[in-house]
Image (spheres, helix red, strand yellow):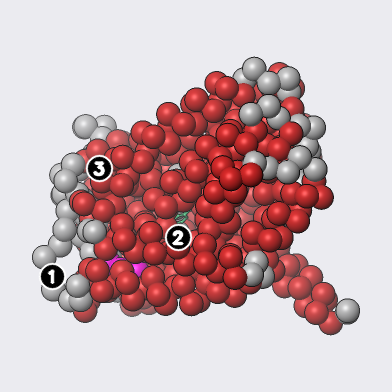
Amino acid sequence: MAERETWATRVGFVLAAVGSAVGLGNIWRFPFQVGENGGAAFLVVYLVFVGVVGLSVLLAELVVGRSARQSPVEAFAELAQGVWEHLGWLFVATAFILLSYYTVVAGWIARYAVEGMRSGYPSSVEAADAQFAAAATGVDAVVFHGMFMAATVVVVGLGLRCGVELAAKVTLPVLVVLLVALAVYVSDMSGAETAYSYYLSPDFGEVAANWKEILPAAAGQAFFTLSLGMGVMITYASYIEKDEKIVRDGAAIVALDSFIAVLVGLIVFPILFTAGMPPAEPGHGAVFVSLASAFGSVPMGGGLGTVFFATVVLAALLSTVGLMEVVVSHILDYEGVERTVAAGGVGLTLFVVGIPAASSLVVVDFYDLFVNRVLLVVGALLLSVYVGWRLSNEAAGVVSRGTGGFDGFGRLWLWTLRVPVILVLVVVLGFGVADYVGLVQDIAETFVSP
Ligand code: PFF
């Protein structure tokens, strides 16, 4: 087996993990999850979810990665017995599917950044609709998907320290500066006051009335945004030195990722409210249409939109890099292939697999719901059962070591993972499967009845 690479610095590891966590989920998906699920009420449920369930599952992934110091497939093969030995394959397969359409959506965004620079954004919803239809399908969508995949291959091919770690160290500070600057800029807009009260003053009656929608959406968003259930954090933790303090690192990852998501809301909602756009339109396309037409109708919208979409491109790149690293690290552990060859081969295969998603929005919806509502939750659930009940005390020991003498934290974490997290995940999976079956039925009906 090849000599295993390690991160140059602990900060490098945390930034790479934050880079994977911060992506389309925070900047594109999050504001519209808030919009579809009642504004501030969703925000509160989401933050509780990220802080308790998200952090617990994140620590479980970090424990597995650091204990085995191998990619997910080999980590479970080494640590686990019986059927658990194969769990890593689920993570690799999920990362593979997610990456195949994530670069398609990231490609749409890259195109929006380029178009905003060239010709600004349309101010009417009809024109924005037409712009989205042109960007999302056809040859151009395939080309942008290919370019995004190629950029991911380059960063992964450069290696852990010179590619992934360096990209995260350079990109994340730029991202935060751009987002803070945008948030300050939009705070003067006419719709800012209304937007802030919509986004920041929760109505808990709303949570009680709509918990069946809010809970699974908040859970799905929490796992997606923290890159959980796909082995990215296992893979990244497999490159850290044994003595790293994973609780501190995990808390930093959760805090930074949530900070960026909240910040993005402070940008998107003032723009939408100023342009008089509803924040609650569902669907992948609606996101682009309403945001682009909002940028088209506010002062300096062209420049603002270009900076915004360019920021999303940077964030998405660090996420695709993490996903590809899961698949590539598996090949490197196993087959002893060159990193550049592994990255190139995986990129080419994923490019081909992603072509249907670049050709039809229905395929993107189909993949996205399957990954978010089913695969990701199954992955997190099985991981929690395995770490909580099988690895149990050994795992609690690893967590406790990182708390500077606060041994009780390891046990508290273990019991949180064992009971509440598992129960919540079972409920969320039930709702998720129902959602997914509903989508499949809708699609089938569309095809049967002309
Ligand atoms: N966390 C990323 C985002 O918020 O866009 C998406 C993601 C990346 C999910 C990597 C899962 C993953 F393994």
Q: Which residue is mark 3?
A: 12
Write the residue at 60% across / 38% down: 305
Of pointers 1 and 3, the one earlier in the residue sequence = 1
Quarter the C terminus occupies: bottom right
* Viewer-side residue, 357 vs 388: 357
Q: Is residue 307 magenta?
A: no
Residue 57 lies, in percent from the top left, at: 42, 50
Q: Which residue is mark 1?
A: 2
Quote the CA–CA distance across marks 2 and 3: 23 Å
Disc 1 C-beta below 8 A from ligand 1: no
Q: Quadrant of residue 194?
A: top right
Q: Residues within 10 Å of mark 3 (few under 14, many from 20)?
A: many
Q: Is residue 391 visible?
A: no
Disc 1 element: loop
| Three-letter residue code for mark 3 | Gly
**Of 124 and 361, the residue lying toward us:** 124
Label 3 lies in ligand 1 vicinity (Cβ under 8 Å): no
Residue type highlighted by circle 2: Phe
Residue at left 52%, top 67%?
Answer: 143
Residue 328 shown in magenta: yes
- Indicate the secondary structure of the residue bearing disc 3: helix
Residue extending furthest bottom? Answer: 448
Query: Percent from the top left, x then y, of residue 241?
Result: 16, 49
* Residue designated by label 2: 148
Q: Nearer the viewer, residue 348 or 91?
A: 348
Magenta residues, as a range?
Answer: 326-330
Q: Residue at x 64, y 44 (%)?
A: 119
Cα separation between marks 1 and 2: 29 Å
